[in-house]
């Protein structure tokens, strides 16, 4: 399978793992050695200001740290967008590395001012990780849909609605129908 770095993984309704139920992840790395991603729709209750205050001003609402995944919750990963209309941005240095379009990973150890054209940031505690072949097997088993990342996905102000919003924008009729999936099956 070719790399799906920069794509989103959207949990299918049949994915029963409570860690990933109705999750939307962006794939930050995907090589033969495995894959790594962060969940875009799991806000925590921890304000960014308390965890890493130097970045607070650039953090998109809600200004909380997001749970990136169940692995290593003490590590922080930053996604950032740069203010540039050109989708072929070539900024790449020790502070920001492109992922796709205007979105990239940001080095949280540097000062925000060192990131050229910084627009907004989302900070994640922890991540999701897959061993070699594991993610490919999960995709083959229909646990994940692999879809395109929209520039707004990492910075949505309504993370609890992101799973349904991703389906609502799909051109494929079957995928778009999932926007109607019940939010709570027990109340259906």
Image (spheres, rainbow, N blue to C red):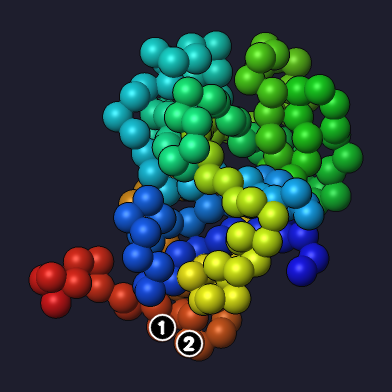
Dividing the image into 4 quarters, which one contains the C terminus? bottom left
In space, the residues marked 1 and 2 are separated at their CA atoms by: 5 Å
Please indicate whether residue 125 sits to the left or right of residue 9 in the image: left
* Residue sitting farthest toward the bottom: 173
Q: Residue furthest right?
A: 90
Q: Is residue 101 visible?
A: no
- Residue 81 can be seen, yes or no: yes
Q: Is residue 79 above or below residue 159?
A: above
Q: Position of residue 58 (x, y in %)?
A: 55, 25
Q: Residue at point 64% right, 35% down? A: 80
Spot the residue most to the left. 187
Q: Secondary structure at mark 2?
A: helix
Q: Which residue was labeled with disc 2?
A: 174
The tag on residue 98 is none
Q: Which residue is mark 1?
A: 177
Mark 2 residue crowding within 10 angstroms, few (<14) / some (14–19) / many (20+): few
Give the side of residue 162 with respect to residue 78, left or right: left
Within 10 Å of disc 1 (Cα), the crowding (few <14, some 14-19, many 20+) is few
Q: Position of residue 122 (x, y in %)?
A: 53, 34
Instruction: Reply above or below: 89 against 122.
Output: below
Q: Position of residue 79 (x, y in %)?
A: 61, 36
Q: Identify the residue at image location x=34%, y=34%.
A: 44
Which quarter of the rendering shows the N terminus? bottom right
Q: Is residue 167 left or right of residue 30?
A: left
Residue 50: % across, % down: 39, 13
Q: Are marks 1 and 2 in contact (CB under 8 Å)?
A: yes
Observer-nearest residue: 158 or 1?
A: 1
Q: Going 69% across and 35% down the picture, which residue do you hit?
A: 105
Residue 188, compared with residue 91, is above or below; it is below
Q: Secondary structure at mark 1?
A: helix
Q: Quadrant of residue 43?
A: top left
């Amino acid at each position: 399978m070719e790399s799906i770095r920069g794509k989103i993984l959207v949990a299918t309704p049949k994915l029963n793992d409570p860690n990933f139920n109705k999750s939307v992840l962006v794939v930050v790395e995907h090589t033969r050695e495995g894959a790594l991603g962060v969940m875009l729709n799991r806000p925590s209750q921890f304000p960014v200001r308390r965890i890493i205050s130097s970045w607070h001003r650039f953090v998109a609402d809600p200004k909380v740290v997001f749970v990136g995944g169940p692995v290593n919750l003490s590590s922080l990963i930053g996604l950032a967008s740069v203010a540039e209309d050109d989708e072929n941005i070539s900024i790449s240095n020790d502070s920001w590395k492109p992922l796709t379009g205007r979105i990239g990973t940001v080095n949280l150890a540097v000062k925000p001012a060192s990131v050229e054209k910084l627009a907004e940031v989302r900070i994640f505690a922890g991540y999701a990780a897959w061993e070699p072949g594991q993610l490919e097997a999960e995709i083959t088993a229909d646990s994940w849909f692999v879809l395109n990342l929209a520039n707004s996905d990492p910075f949505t102000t309504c993370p609890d609605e992101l799973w349904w919003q991703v389906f609502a924008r799909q051109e494929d009729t079957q995928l778009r129908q999932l926007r109607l999936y019940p939010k709570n099956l027990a109340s259906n």
